[in-house]
Image: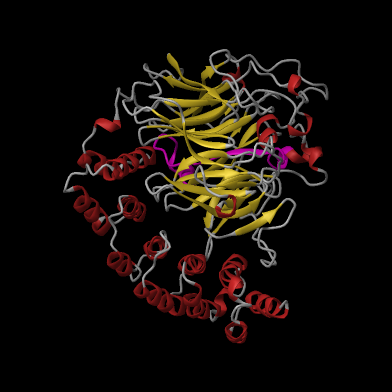
Amino acid sequence: MHRWSSVSFGFATILLASSSVSFADDEPALAPVPAAEAPQRMTLPEGFRATLFAGEPDVVQPIAVAFDDRGRLWVAECLSYPTWDEDGEDRIVIFEDTDNDGRFDKKKIFWDEGNYLTGLAVGFGGVWACCAPHLLFIPDRDGDDVPDGEPEVVLDGWSVEGVHNVVNGLTWGPDGWLYGCNGITSPSKVGLPGTPEEERIDISCGIWRYHPVRQKFEVVAHGTTNPWGLDFNDYGHAFFTNCVIGHLWHLVPGAHYQRMFGQDFDPYVYELMHSCSDHLHWGGGEWTDSRGGQGIHSIAGGGHAHSGAMVYLGDNWPAEYRNSIFMCNIHGNRVNRDLLERTRSGYVGRHADDFLFAHDPWFRGVAIAYGPDGGVYVTDWCDTGECHDNKENAIERANGRIHKIVYGQPPRLETFDLAKLDDAELVKLHLHENAWYVRRARRLLQERAARGELAPATMATLQDLLRSDSATPRRLRALFTLHALDALPEAQLLDLTQNDNEYLRAWAVRLLNDHQNASPAAIARMEEMAAADDSGLVRLELASALQRIPAASRWPIAAGLVACEDDADDHNLQLMIWYGVEPLATTDALAAARLASQSNLPLVRRFLARRIASR
């Protein structure tokens, strides 16, 4: 196994990252491997095979993908990069493989008026699209693949000046929120249309989320450089891929991560959290040395530029790949694989053998996702150059491929539409080995709950699954769906905080604070847990929750957390505690001094003293 990892630089490093050398010499390759030959060139582990799902001219500039409830692949084609213009021709295209041969046989254009189209998601009667400066919702409530009207602006204020670092992504989270990313050179002030400037929320680089029912926008975590790709493991924990300063990050709500440059919005955070990987995918030195992904950089993993994130939870690949995270390595013309290993309060990403080698210097993987048969789709932007050499006339706008990777022969899927299943059938899908079905079943139930159309027995069936299933991931699936349906009373979450299962306790803490309205009883219970719960995972959630509860209620919880000597070597947990109490340190210097004197955590003690002195 290799012990290195990556770094990179932006939308175009993501899209057009360099590797403009051929494998035979140092001269630029004149043309990519022909699309029909590309899958045969690829090297994959034994038992895997690749097919060309779609290639130019049928698809060009594929920057993001999403699935609908019929298993069809929706593709965002970004033709506007790198020039922003109010009038664009970026497209959302629907591809379907009706005969299960690994190649599309039906195609239709859903929408062709986008600009800087960098992410999409399907749900709630339409399509969500990142089109800076907007997050759009394109309605299609009758499901006829024709927009019902003009796109609706859901959020605005996203910067259009970052070029490579614009708002991107879109992934439905297990909590019922829509998640996205934003890069460092696109500082934005985001809000609902019409929100006054002073009430807008600042974000430069980081992860954000939007609730489709409550119409609420939040920044989940600040920092990194250009996050581009986010996914969730079997336990609901999120991980995202980033270009430059580390490729893999465990998403902790309220975190402040290391940045490539610039200052965090809070000048008093003092120290920032690092990537969770223990390796780099490039061999060090100047980042430009990794162009081409050869030599020491190839041994390490291919180079510093990454895009896309997929935690494999499908049912086609062998079990050893489940809960591994896969990402596209652009300079290395390959797909990397990291193992997500639990630590006391989080995860460490360890580099496994690289999964896919394209053997094509034009291969530019951007997005990666598994589908309803467990097969995996990888988009190829198919170009040379990168964001530091992005002259408009250098971009090959006529290129693009989507490859499908399967193990053996997946079972043939009959035509289906999950939206036509009743509630009981959607709940039953929570037991499916392929989380693709679980996630879509959850979203459909959430939509029905928002319309007041759930069958009376639905909640009871989900509650039975939460109580009785022996597998933690299945119990969590039920927990997440009940929360998305707004059907988890506080009393039940309080009861779960005393469960023997640390994952259930940890998620109970997070969900108690999801709406930032924890009751006095919930806050009192968190005080008890901070003093007594020995799970690092639970303690990390308690530290994260500090930022979501009233200021005066934070001190007793923080006191319990800083008393734990076992956490003295846990860098992230100490920082999360600090981020929660820092805003209060000068408003109540006496309480801050008292907390510092009680602390067995050296980092928290040192930062408290420093912040008090800064007055």
Q: Position of residue 217 (x, y in %)?
A: 49, 50
Colouring chosen for the image of the structure: secondary structure
Decide which of 468, 532 is in the foreground and name it: 532
The reply to whether residue 350 is visible in this rendering is no
Position of residue 359 relative to residue 541, above or below, is above
Taking depth in this image into account, of 553 and 148 the one nearest to the observer is 148
Residue 250 sits in quarter: bottom right
| Residue 118 vs residue 198, the one in the foreground | 198
Q: Is residue 319 magenta?
A: yes
Q: Which of the image's four quarters has the C terminus? A: bottom right
Tell how many labels.
0
Residue 174 shows up from this direction: yes
Q: In this view, does 232 lie above or below 35?
A: below
Image coords of residue 200 (percent x, y): 56, 51
Q: Where is residue 470 in the image (x, y as percent from the top left)?
A: 29, 56
Is 335 or 222 nearer to us in this picture? 222
Looking at the rendering, which quadrant does residue 387 occupy? top right
Residue reaching furthest to the left: 456
Q: Quadrant of residue 186?
A: top right
Q: In this view, does 101 lie to the left or right of 181?
A: left
Q: Which residue is drawn at 37% across and 46% down?
A: 213
Residue range in magenta is 298-323
Query: Any magenta on residue 111?
Result: no
Residue at the image point whose x is 35% and y is 33% from the top: 125
- Tell me residue 503's x, y (percent): 40, 61
Compared across the picture, whether 549 is left or right of 428 comes to: right
